[in-house]
Amino acid sequence: MASKEAIASTQADDGNSVVVNGNLEYVYEKGGNEAIPSYQEASGAPVEQQSPLGYNVRWVTAAMLNIGMIIGTGVFSTPAVILQNVGSVGFAMIFWVLGFLVSAAGLVVYLELASYFPSRSGSEVVYLEQAYPRPKYFLPITFAVQSVILSFSSGNSIVLAQYLFQVADSEPTAWKLKGVAVAGYTVAVLLLSFNTKLSLYLVNVISVIKIITLVFISITGFVVLGGYTSVPDPKANFRNSFEGTTNSAYGITNALVKVMFAYQGYANAFNVVNEVKKPIKTLRMSAGISLLTVAVLYILCNIAYFAAVPKEQLKNSQQTAASLLFKAVFNSRRASRGLSFLITLSAFGNLVAVLVGQSRMIRECARQGVIPFPQFWVSTRPFGTPLGPYFLKWFVTVIMIVAPPAGDAFNFLVDLQSYPAAVCNASLTVGVFLIRHQRKNIGAPKTEFRGWNVVLIFSLLINIYLLAMPWYPPKSGSTGGDVSFWYATYCVVGIGILVICALYYYAWIYLLPKLGGYQIRQEVVELEDGATTHRLRKVPNDQLSLWDREHDVSGRARHRSGRGPEMTLSWSQPIKRSNLYCRIMQPSSSEARGPVFHSTDLNTLLYHIFRHPSPAAQWLGAARGSTLQMVGLSLSIPSSWHRYRALGIVPAPNSI
């Protein structure tokens, strides 16, 4: 049930309505992807009635988008690091299961959030915008700034280049490595730039090859365990498998971070929700299948590594676990080069899947109006692809490949991405409970998916742990991390970025408007390709009332009926009673089927009646030469208003 303080309106015929709860205004919108219509706070980017990127994402592609981003280089490189941190084979295997459980809990969070906004792409952009709508534009600006600054994919680009040189059996210089990394990323961007269907097809093909690679490694592990190779004792690591388990909090935390890095990408398909028909039904199936498939393959691959490679060799080697496996089983240089090629392809596929997902995320940031020149970033012309976000990703990634030297600077920048991401994940989980509360207040209907509270609490606790533990010093002291300076520097800088975003927000939205005599208002802009975006406009203070009359709560220009000037309002005495309400009734029935408004203040009530974008309110606002006269506690209406029989403003029963 809606709260008594809420101002609510409902339009039965066209499904377009606004619900006001305190200072929040919710619009009821529907996209073209066959999703259930839903309420969203009006300051958010408008729902695109028809996706300019098309509806080419079926359940298989949605699954492959997740798999393509999850399976990068993590499963080949992190097993040794995790073993080093936890100390024992048994505990390392538990962490791969734990990574699956944490990811599954996170997936539940994303599914519930997507069910609230099933026609908006961009995942976190949308969910943070709607969970924390006030202060207005604060979360969109903060997320947009950190997304742009930290949107680089330099790490996987350099890994791609390293394995390409291994395939070529060549030792590169630092600048050759950077050059090949830039070339590899440029190829990925160009392949996606000219056709959306081609980009999704490429994701599907490479993801299938990744699955086949992990299946091959898994089968190799079973062959080793069966004693059909030259490995002398394939079961040695599984005897006393928990021997050497660490009690270091730093080691355990680092292992959890590394395993979550390997699972990162399980929610990539949520970035393309508005390109999916019946998205919640589709994603509930595809996301679950993709995560379970990868988890099973990850566990089987780790069993293969531990079967073929002695524990101490795996802990101390600088090579990837997969390389050690192939060397132990095949002992062939050609086989090692073949593996390097497969890892190269896996890294390239990760770049492609990340580009597809993050381009939609950046585009959604622009649709909120918080990035300068939003039309450029939102447009899909001329090829029906998000060229602006692709270019931005390419530009930032190239800078981060070329500028920082190898070693401390590179490791620091990679770590820097992780802490704002952890803040985001924790905020998303809290956001689920906030949105539930908001929807309860406005009486919104149930959605297609709702997660169990115990799962959400588990996800929240893990995220809080990941936020707190990076501050815990390693055993080797304050400089014992993966950089030579203070181990938690990246945490401080990450928080510093968020603080800078807050200062920028205050200056842009409050300080400069106060000094300049204007306020920020949002305007809905429709582009020629069908894309829809917000644009934030500077409206002088003396023009605010005119702007608000001519635009609805979302920022769309009102369409006047042309039947005369707006009505004038007058009343003979002030109304001080609380919780007033207004009901517009249809002429054919005694039941109230039109808009219903509630307020504790008469002026607020009248303001929302005539600002409301519904046809009823617009008709009232355009009635020719009409005057409302306040008589006691009611409003009289001229009989010439034939479309609506009665409009009354009286105290609610509990305040009489």
Image (cartoon, rainbow, N blue to C red):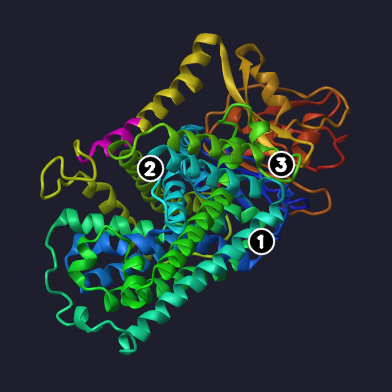
| Badge 1 or badge 2: first in the primary sequence | 1
The dot on residue 380 is 3
Q: CA distance from mark 1 to mark 3?
A: 19 Å
The 10 Å Cα crowd at callout 2, few under 14, some 14 to 19, many 20 or more, is: some
The dot on residue 417 is 2
Looking at the rendered structure, the kind of residue marked 1 is Tyr
Looking at the rendered structure, the kind of residue marked 2 is Gln
- The residue under the point 45% across, 19% down is 507
Q: Observer-nearest residue: 135 or 219? A: 219
The 10 Å Cα crowd at callout 3, few under 14, some 14 to 19, many 20 or more, is: many
Can the viewer see residue 94 in this picture?
A: yes
Q: CA distance from mark 3 to mark 2?
A: 28 Å
Label 1 sits on residue? 201
595 w.r.t. 244: above or below: above
Region rendered in magenta: 487-496
| Badge 3 or badge 2: first in the primary sequence | 3
What element does badge 2 sit on? helix
What element does badge 3 sit on? loop
Expressed as whole percent of the image width and height from the top left, the position of residue 348 reads 52, 55
The 10 Å Cα crowd at callout 1, few under 14, some 14 to 19, many 20 or more, is: some
Q: Is residue 366 magenta?
A: no
